[in-house]
Image: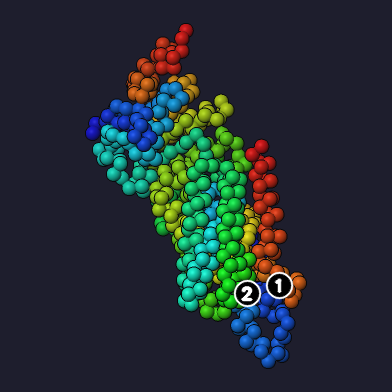
Amino acid sequence: MTEGIILETRNLTVGYGRKPVVSGVDMALRAGEITAVAGENGCGKSTLLKTLGGAIPPLSGTMEAMGQDITGLSAKERAKLMAIVMTRAVRPDYFTCHDMVSSGRYPYTGRLGTLSDHDLDIVEEAMEITGTRDIKDRYMSEISDGQRQLVMLSRAIAQEPKILLLDEPTNFLDIKHKKLFADVVKGLVSKGEMTVIMSMHELDIVKETADRVMTIKNGGILKQGKTSDILTDAFIAELFDLSH
Amino acid sequence: MKKDIASYLILIIFILIPAALGIILGTAGFDDPGFYTILMGIRLPRTLAALVLGGALAVSGYLLQVFFSNPIAGPFVLGISGGAKLMTAVVLILFLGRGIHINSAGMVLASFIGAAISTMAVLFISRYTDRMSVLVLSGVMIGYICSALTDFLITFADDRNIVNLHYWSMGSFSGMNMGNVLCFSVFAVIGLAGSFALKKPIGAYLTGEEYARSVGVDLKLFRILLILCSSLLSATVTAFAGPISFVGVAVPHLARRMFRTVRPEKMIPACFLGGAAFCLISDLAARLLFSPTELSISSVTAVFGAPVVIMVLLERGRRHD
């Protein structure tokens, strides 16, 4: 394991069933950095993140977190290592934002899931960080999309993960909430231990927030490296087949 | 918190009053010589049946609503009660026809298998649709098919014992004895304890299955345990009281509105108390409205319960427009 690398994959192939979507993924997440995954719709960004998060098994290759094979982790150990935010959140009736954020404490609570004072403090703090404490008693079904994604981010923060997996978290948000969301993520990383990998379409936000970028095209990694080196106008045109 | 306690107290009052009336009211009065026998042999077991089975049915409905993320799921509308009823009738007719007596536990087992088969059918359909209205309609159809087959079996079975099945197959809390009460109480307590033991993953499952998995819920195991608890509860009800309509849908909805939450630690006790109250009141109405003629319990619960389902559908339809 190289110093400062928190998650590393070697020759990873991801996909559904037996059908590979992206192959030959060699990547490393550096602790305390934000890595963005970019590429066209359907290129496999989501599949890659789902595989890293354990929702689907890898087809081949290895995934290691701090030198340990993550496919061998128990569900609880994995939940303490990684938390996710996806594009969509469910909005059950009569389920408050506080209930939602509390669910992030799942790996830490006992058999009946009773929250300790410590758990409640962490939940409050996680909502403070995203600025959603004011709406903690409102129902998930009655807040805006932007607020909902910030609540889901608080839920992930309350999970106290080392790695945050964000799968197109801002797709349905207005520009104000997209920026707000990205700022909160950036603040989290700058403060300390959190490492982020996110897929995102908004390249202007990627440029502002991500330290590194990994691009996917035609079932493989096209290019990865420092954001400023990768996201040149010429390369963006190549990545998205834009002719000038 | 204070509000919740007040709500629970209201539910308990709504249990105690109809329960007391159910025991006191009737053709035989206190001074009748056979009063004690009627009390212990007929009225008390019937009252306890409405209380325990009504509560069990509502909790079963809540579990199904969690499972399908669908506020109009319930053992009756998804055809699960129908499957339980059909399997119980088949087993009873097969065994009674050959002069073999089966005990209450055997009935519950048969009913449980029927409930499980129906649940499997609904699960199979749910893989092809995300729309709750389609799922519920399919469940209602499964229920009709099971009901038709049961009627067919009962009509053509000529054994005298089976004539009683006719009342059971329409849903009724009558004809219970204290032995039955003991038996269904044991199964109900197992089902309720199991449901409560699942409160942690239920809470996580309410956030959606992908998020539930990401915090460490073993989805496969959880789904199996949830369905087992729900099927055990609704099978116990059906084995003893036949299919009882709409309690499993209406009560969880009313409980959600009353307690303003879907969280299991409040909903499981609230649904149990609410289901008990709902069934006690309905049974009282079934007994007394046109006394001495008795209505089937399902006719009464449907009158109260079906409008609640329509209300939920309209409410959700409006929100998603």
Among numbered discs 1 and 2, the one appearing first in the sequence: 2
Q: Which mark is residue B294?
A: 1
Chain letter of the residue carrying label 1:
B
- Can residue B79 be seen at all in this image of the molecule? yes
In front: B257, or B309?
Answer: B309
Few, some or many C-alpha atoms within 10 Å of disc 1 (few <14, some 14-19, many ≥20)?
Answer: some
The part of the image, by quadrant, that contains residue A136 is top right
Point 37% across, 29% down: residue: A21
Which residue carries the number 2 mark?
B174
**Extreme-left residue of the structure:** A1
Residue A56 screen position, x and y as percent: 37, 39
**Extreme-right residue of the structure:** B290
The image shows residue B110, relative to residue A233, as above or below, that is: below
Tell me how far mark 1 sits from mark 2, CA to CA.
Answer: 10 Å
Residue type indicated by callout 1: Glu
Chain letter of the residue carrying label 2:
B
